[in-house]
Structures are given as C-alpha cells and as structure tokens.
Amino acid sequence: MPNFTPEDLLLYQAGELDSAQSEVMTEELLSNWTLREKYNVLKEAFARLNSMNLQSPRQQTISAIMRYAMRKPVTV
C-alpha cells in the first residue's frame, strides 16, 4: 500500500499524474476507504470553489498591494 500525500490527490484530481501513478492511485482509491474519503472531500471542495461567484478586488486594494511591493527592502 503506497503512501499518498494531499499533493498527490490534487495532482490526480487535476489529471497531472503520469499514467503509471494515475493507475496506482485509481486502484488505491478503489480499495482504500480512508484515501477515498479524503479524495471525496477534495472533489467536493473543488466543486464548491468552481460554483462560487468571485468578485474582483477593489482598485484601492490593488493600489495598496502595488505600493507595498514597490517599497525598497529593509536591510538588516
């Protein structure tokens, strides 16, 4: 039984595992209840994020971030 990380599950969800790793993951998801539950939680989170109506940040917020990024770093 291989150990899979949350990053592995993300890559599998995104279809970015190579074919051999993807096949092993598929087989493990069929037989490992704990891994399957973690994957289902991840899938649900993806679905919720994709269904949300996102708003663009205010111009004031973008300007504040850009001003902060333009500051010279403090040397210690």
Image (cartoon, rainbow, N blue to C red):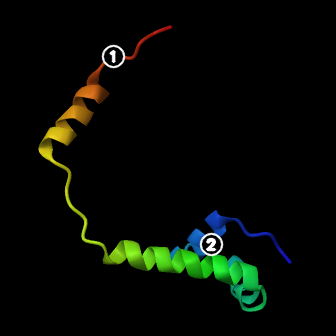
Q: Quadrant of residue 23?
A: bottom right
Amino acid identity at mark 2: Leu
- Badge 1 amino acid: Lys
- Which residue: 30% across, 73% down? 52
User: Would you name the residue on which mark 1 appears?
Assistant: 72
Please state the horizontal and vertical placement of residue 61, each as a whole percent of the image: 20, 40
Residue 67 rendering spot, x and y as whole percentages = 23, 27
Which residue carries the number 2 mark? 9
Q: Is residue 26 left or right of residue 47?
A: right
SS at circle 2: helix
Above or below 68: residue 23: below
The residue at 40%/76% (across/down) is: 48
Is tag 2's residue or tag 1's residue first in the polypeptide sequence?
2
In the current view of this chain or complex, which residue is farthest to the right?
1
What whole-number distance in Å separates the C-alpha atoms at marks 2 and 1? Answer: 39 Å
| Label 2 Cα crowd, 10 Å radius (few <14 / some 14-19 / many 20+) | many
Relative depth, front residue between 75 and 55: 55
Circle 1 packing at 10 Å, graded few (<14), some (14-19), many (20+), is: few
Residue 15 showing in the rendered view: no
Q: Secondary structure at mark 1?
A: loop
Quadrant housing residue 18: bottom right
Mark number displayed over residue 31:
none
Q: Residue furthest top?
A: 76
